[in-house]
Structure formats: C-alpha cells, structure tokens
Amino acid sequence: MMKVEDVMRVRAGTGASGLQDSYEAGKQAATAAVSKLGGEKPSLVLVFTMPHYDLSLLLSGIRSVTGSVHLAGATGSGEILRAEYMGFGAGVAVMVMTAGPYRFGIASASNIHGDLDQSGQKIARESKAEAGPSPYSAMILLADCLAGNLQQLFQGVYKITGPKTCIVGGAAGDELQFKATFVFHDDKVIDQGAVAVWIASDKPLHTSIQHGWEPVGVPLLVTRAEGTEIMELGGRPACEAYEEQLGVAPGELTAENFWDTSMHHPLGILQMDGSSIIRVARTKTPDGSLLIQGCVPPAGSAVQVMKSSEDLLLAVAEDVGHDALSGNPEAAVVIAFSCAMRARLLKDRIPEEAARLQAAAGEAEVFGLYCCGEFARVSGTLGTHNATLAAIAL
C-alpha cells in the first residue's frame, strides 16, 4: 500500500527528442519523461519546443504517451533539460509531474492582441476556478511575444491573482525570427494566444528572479512613453539621451546598428527597493524614439542604462536555483525561464547557465525555456522582464 507521504510527494521527469518526424519526436520525448515517474500517472505536462515541427502532430505524439492530462507549453528559442542547453533546431523537451500536494487548473485565450487586459483576466479566472480554492497559489504564464504590450496581459492576470499568488513564465518565441509564435493548451496549438496554469497549494510557493545587470549611467526620468515606445527621457528625444549615457555622438546609433549596441546596454527601471527591472530597446525610430521589447517603462518612472558581462550573467544562475529551492527543498522540478538575448550574449558559454542551474537544483530536474521576455513578480505590479532569469520550484 502506498504511504500518504508518497502520495503527497511530487515526482517529475523530463525527456527530449531531436527526431525530425513530429509525431515520433513528441512520443519519444514524452516516453523518456514518463519513464521517470515510477509507474505513477502524470497530472501536468509542459512542452517547450522549436517552432519547425508540425505542432499538432507533435502534441498528438506526446499525448499518445501521457494521455489527456493537462498540457501547457510554448515554442521558444532554446530549452534547458537538466544540465543541458538545447539550442536552435535541437528539438522538443517535455516535462511531466505528478500532482503531489498540488491541484492544477489551465485556461487559454486566442487572438489576444488588442484585448490583453481582458484576456489576462479570463485565463486567470478560469484556471483558478478549475484548480479550486487553496491558501497558497502560483501561476505559470505563457504568451505570444508578438501580441504587443504584455504588461497589459500581466495586469489583467494580476487583477485576479492579487499580490499573494506568485507568477512566473515567459513569452513564446520562434528562434528570434519574430514571425509567428505559439502556445499550447492540451491538444490545441494557439496562435496569437496565452495560456495559464494555476497551481493550488497548501504551502507557500516562491518565484526567484535575478538578471546580473548593473547601472552604467545616471537615472533618467521617462517623460513621454506610449505602447512599446519611449519618446522622451528627461524631456529630450529618448535615443539622444541614451546615446549620451553611452558616450557616443548623437546619431551614431542608426536603425541598422542599434541592436548591436542596445543588447549590451538595456534599460533598468528603478524600483522602490533599489532593484531594477530590465527593458531592452530593440531599435530606434526616425524621430529618435526607442522601441522596447515587451512594454515601456511607465511615464514618470526612472531608468538607467545598464551593462553586464558573461561572468555576471552566469553568476545569477546558482543564486536563482538555490533561491527557488529555499522555500521548497523537497521540490522535484525547477521550472526556469531565461531570455533568448542572454543566450546571444553568452555565446559559447550559454551551456554553463543550464549546468549551473542544475548544480544548484541538486536532485530536482531543471526544465526551462529561452523566451522573448520573462514574466515574474516579486513586489509591485510590474511583472514583465527582458534579459532576466526566473524560476519556480515545485
């Protein structure tokens, strides 16, 4: 007879496949993951994959093994499987876990562009209702990176979750092509959508987040911003003020060469506790505005130009892993969300991020996605990030 403590303990398994046949790749990855559950049935399946597969067939292959249990996932720009970094074109990664002490609810929305706040409220409300009431909770949130200002989606979610529910996740990608990204809900492949997994728990859950960036410039006041565009910093054209902080001549950064500089120098939104939330400017407009990946810092906030190094970016991996497990040392899996830009900056050293996360996680399996923007909230209502590493232990 199975003991109560065994029933309440989470089991998790991960698996991957590089097969080109979509159905067989999904089946192979799921088979490897389920084999680690010791004969128990999974209650939640997460799927992170490259976008080149026939995604409907891929999910069919996975569900031929897992059955019709809750499934969520997204396309991305790389995956983390235990201590391994799976780069562009590497294949599909699958994580399965038993329920243990948790109850899961899942909900999705399609065509969210232009209706982000309401879509966020919808998926939060529906996933919460399915999971049922609990003293503590968390959410895994995945969304199309091309849907616009994802802070609006996060705000909609936050209106339902409130401050006590920790949120973690990322924006789906397509290997930095920025053409089409997808999220998954059970057997559905959703274009221009979002999916939420609500985790009901009887004990506190915790989001860990760090980035490894430090300020290089003085604080600048955002005096005009709208949508995904910063028009003015300190009452001046935003790009002019940005160039000045970097010590380059006005106009030296063109639309063509801007990204090569801005990826090394994102903006940090100053927070009340002294921390910074990272925003990356993808390009500049002809009139000198900065176009931000994700959402702009709100007008009236202060930002600083930031810098980092490979060593600083990598150093946070152990801290995130240890911190994620600090409140849940018996966790079976650490689910991580890193940024595709971090992968580009780390170059040949990017496999070290996965290795360091797994070293910190110990016996827990690390399962992660390289995103085009990360979701996480520790304090305040801002929950969208760039070039950041976030994780939760379950």
Image: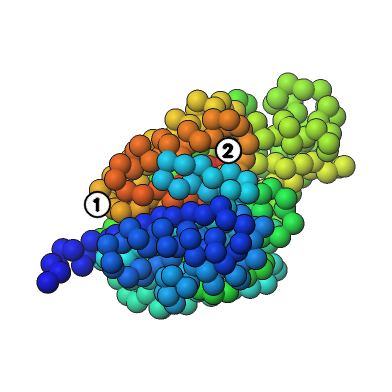
Q: Residues within 10 Å of mark 1 (few under 14, many from 20)?
A: some
**Residue 31: percent from left, percent from top:** 42, 62
Q: Residues within 10 Å of mark 2 (few under 14, many from 20)?
A: many
- Which numbered disc covers residue 135? none
Sooner in the amino-acid sequence: mark 2 or mark 1: 1
Q: Is residue 44 left or right of residue 296?
A: left
Q: Quadrant of the N terminus?
A: bottom left
**Residue 102: percent from left, percent from top:** 30, 67
- Which numbered disc covers residue 342? 2
Q: Amino acid at mark 1?
A: Glu
Which residue is located at x 18 percent, y 63 percent?
Answer: 6
Residue 194, compared with residue 129, is above or below; it is above
**Residue 2: percent from left, percent from top:** 15, 69
Residue 138, compared with residue 326, is above or below; it is below
Q: Is residue 34 left or right of residue 22?
A: left
Q: Toward which corner of the image does residue 42 lie, by quadrant?
A: bottom left
Q: Is residue 246 visible?
A: yes
Residue sitting at the far right: 286
Residue 89, compared with residue 62, is above or below; it is above
- Residues 315 and 383: in front is 315
Which residue is located at x 81 percent, y 23 percent?
Answer: 249
Q: Secondary structure at mark 1?
A: loop
Residue wearing tag 1: 330
- Residues 383 and 211: in front is 211
Q: Amino acid at mark 2?
A: Arg
**Residue 379: percent from left, percent from top:** 43, 50
Q: Secondary structure at mark 2?
A: helix
Q: Quadrant of the C terminus?
A: bottom left
Residue 353, compared with residue 148, is above or below; it is above
